[in-house]
Image (cartoon, grey):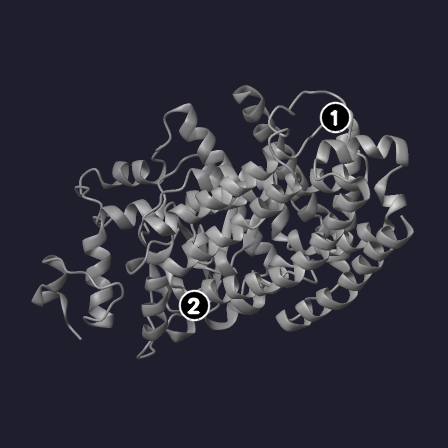
Amino acid sequence: MMESGFHGCDLDDSLKCKLEESGTQNTHSVMEKAAAWFRSRSIFVVAYGTGCGAIEMPPTFTSRYDAERMGVVGVATPRQADLIILSGYLAYKTLRRVIRTYEQMQKPKYIITLGSCPINGGMYWDSYNTIKKLDDYLPVDVSVVGCMPRPEAVIDGFSLLQKRIKNGEKAGWEKYDENLDFYKKNQKRVLGNHVDPSYETDWYNLENGSEV
Amino acid sequence: MIFQIILLIMLAYVVGFIYMGLYRNITARIQGRYGPTVYQTFYDSIKLFSKKNSVSYGWMFYLGPVIMATGAVLTLILVPVFSDSDFLRSVTTQGNLFLLLYLMVLGPLGNALAVGTGGNPFGVMGVVRGLTRLIGLELPFYIAVVGLIIASNSSDIVHIIDLQKTTGLNILVHPFLFIAAMISMVGFFGASPFDIPGAPQEVYSGPRTEFSGKFLALLMSQGSIFAFAKLVLIIDLFLGGADSLWMLVIKTFAIFITIIFIGIVYGRYKVEQAVDFLMKIPTLIGVIGLVRIIWFG
């Protein structure tokens, strides 16, 4: 039996719920559909080079593979970005900065991870200071597997993300908004009370959330 | 008149954005890439306008892009677009070159006020670099404009255009002034070697670092409108204006592609190198042109 997720589904109709979750259409009006199309054609990337995958990003964006022909352009600051690429394992210290960077980005925003480390820990599965499953801490939209994925695979990940944006499927940032308690609890579990930006709300300062 | 102004802004928006798209496409082709489509800047602009905005630094921060857009639009409506017809010329009788030169620096000042409020160190660094560069950029351009005013005995752009029909194009009559103005125009377009304020590897996006979503889109839009206005100003002053839409496109594109090629070939100057260069070579060329006008007619 599939385990009940954190999206408020009952165990009985969990399969139906999963299906709805994967194909939720958020675009109804013509304007929203047009905006989704333009959004898919223009993706500003802030490339957060953690781990070994950072080396795959320069060929993806420069003359050899040229992601700019798909409208995917690198930008310098998270304020202007739509997409953050996390290219490998995340240590607790890195995760703290990544959360801060992600929350500085303006909605709609997406996450692509490269390699197997952000999926299940990869070769760092028993490390004392890296996280294993990034999806518990930040909502991942597309995971490009491989160790490391070639630039072709990264571009395939871009086109998958573009397809999902164009179809108006439910994106990670919406899940993050809806399930902020879940994500913040997990972040607090590994990072302690010092997660940027600081939240002043009651649920965040609950005692049972702090295990470190 | 209001209708004409709106039509002119729409024309400048479309032409300016297609030129910015061409800039990216031609740069990519020269670098051996396929490059984005010509309409890519439209996609970027519309996407940015559709983004949510949840950052606040107070009202001055948000007024900055508006001041910049005001400067760009005012510059645009004071430059006569077509030389022969009265179409889109109803406003241009109100202003002259002096007012135009004043309005062209309104944008950087608005930018400086806004970025100072944001407080991002990279933004402040970008603004300081931009204003320092402006000292160097303005000098040769003002010398060229003053030379043209002396030569045609008028500060009215329409008069300067009309005079070129009898005396010949200013690019041939006053080539030194054209070279001085053109070098400084490369800098006004933010092309290499004068792309110091937003130097990507040094100060991230420079003044645009903290701007996101709709405000970044407004900055991009005013940038392309302003680019079109500057191109039209150059062809009015030196290439005898344009009497039809085709001539407008051909002449502005000729100037634009020159700027693209210069920008791709050269690397980036440091701030002091740029000011040093601009105060020596183009200023000297401009002074030669000025002396030539005053002493030899």
The quarter of the rendered structure image containing the N terminus of chain B is: top right
Q: Residues within 10 Å of mark 2 (few under 14, many from 20)?
A: some
Camera-nearest residue between A47 and A127: A47
Q: Residue at x 42, y 50 (%)?
A: B212
B29 or B234, which is in the foreground? B234
Specify the label residue B245 is tagged with: 1
Kind of residue at disc 2: Pro
Out of B29 and B182, give the one closest to the viewer.
B182
Residue, x 58% and y 65% (percent of image)?
A: B132
Q: Quadrant of residue A210?
A: bottom left
The secondary structure type at the circle numbered 1 is helix
**B55 relative to A78 in the view: left or right:** left
Specify the subunit that label 1 lies on: B
Q: Which residue is mark 2?
A: B121
Left or right side of A178 for B5: right
Q: Nearer the viewer, residue A165 or B31?
A: B31
Do circles 1 and 2 both sit on a common chain?
yes
Residue B117 falls left or right of residue B153? left
Does label 1 or label 2 sit earlier along the sequence? 2
Residue A18, position as x, y percentages in the image: 29, 41
Residue A175 appears in the picture as rendered: yes
